[in-house]
Image (cartoon, grey):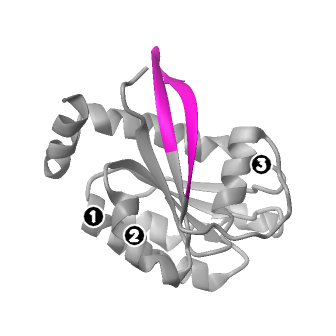
């Protein structure tokens, strides 16, 4: 087991389903309650990457603008990012540029994947491509926290890629690696 957990952040507007995705992935449950995350909720998850036991900390961040002052702490020592939008609300897709720009400001070089959530509402979206993913060369996953469809795919991918990033960090975050191993 790694000495310190590997931090993976979830970003996106409020009510895109970040918390519901975590609930479905970690507990295989779904509660339709619509409560919002206040600040950040941290979920710990023990898993394996290859033959290594690793501990992951998923930071489920609040998407409301009132928590913008907290954002720098969300990014600190993160090794992966899951960027989420709600296919039923166009503005959540439009705001991806702001979230991604902020990610690059604080953690340029860490792996990121894009998740289109709520495909249970409109299953035809699965065949659609999204320019944001293509433009930024991000893996794109179509999921439904409500039904559980494809829910583990983005998390399994980002855990593996975050672990690889920790082992082979980009030059601009090498100090974080040195701090982790001391």
Crowd around label 3: few <14 · some 14–19 · many ≥20 (10 Å): some
SS for dot 1: helix
Name the N-terminal-most of marks 2 and 1.
2
In the picture, the quarter occupied by the C terminus is: top left
Regarding residue 79, the answer to whether it shows in the image is yes
Name the N-terminal-most of marks 3 and 1.
1
Q: CA distance from mark 3 to mark 2?
A: 30 Å
For discs 3 and 1, the disc positioned in front in the rendered view = 1
170 part of magenta stretch: no
Q: Position of residue 37 (x, y in %)?
A: 63, 66
- Do the residues under discs 3 and 1 have CB atoms within 8 angstroms? no
Q: Nearer the viewer, residue 139 or 110?
A: 110
What label sits on residue 71 in the rendered view?
A: 2
In the picture, the quarter occupied by the N terminus is: top left
Q: CA distance from mark 3 to mark 1?
A: 31 Å
The residue that appears at 40% across and 61% down in the rendered structure is 74
Q: CA distance from mark 2 to mark 1?
A: 9 Å
What label sits on residue 149 in the rendered view?
A: 3
- Do the residues under discs 2 and 1 have CB atoms within 8 angstroms? yes
Q: Which residue is mark 1?
A: 106
Q: Nearer the viewer, residue 92 or 29?
A: 29
The residue stretch that appears in magenta: 41-57
SS for dot 3: loop
**In this rendering, would 41 be left or right of 105?**
right
Residue extending furthest toward the top: 51
């Amino acid at each position: 087991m790694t000495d310190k957990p590997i931090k993976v952040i979830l970003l996106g507007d409020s009510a895109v389903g970040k918390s519901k995705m975590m609930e479905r992935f970690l507990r295989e449950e779904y509660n339709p309650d619509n409560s919002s995350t206040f600040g950040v909720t941290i979920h710990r998850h023990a898993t394996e990457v290859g033959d290594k036991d690793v501990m992951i900390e998923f930071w489920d961040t609040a998407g409301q603008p009132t928590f913008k002052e907290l954002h720098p702490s969300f990014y600190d020592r993160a090794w992966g990012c899951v960027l989420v939008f709600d296919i039923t609300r166009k503005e959540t897709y439009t705001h991806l540029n702001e979230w991604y720009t902020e990610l690059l400001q604080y953690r340029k070089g860490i792996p990121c994947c894009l998740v289109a959530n709520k495909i249970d509402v409109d299953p035809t979206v699965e065949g659609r491509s999204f320019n944001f993913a293509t433009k930024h060369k991000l893996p794109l996953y179509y999921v439904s926290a409500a039904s559980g469809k494809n829910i583990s795919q983005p998390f399994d991918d980002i855990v593996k890629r975050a672990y690889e990033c920790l082992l082979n960090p980009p030059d601009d975050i090498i100090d974080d690696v040195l701090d982790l191993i001391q």
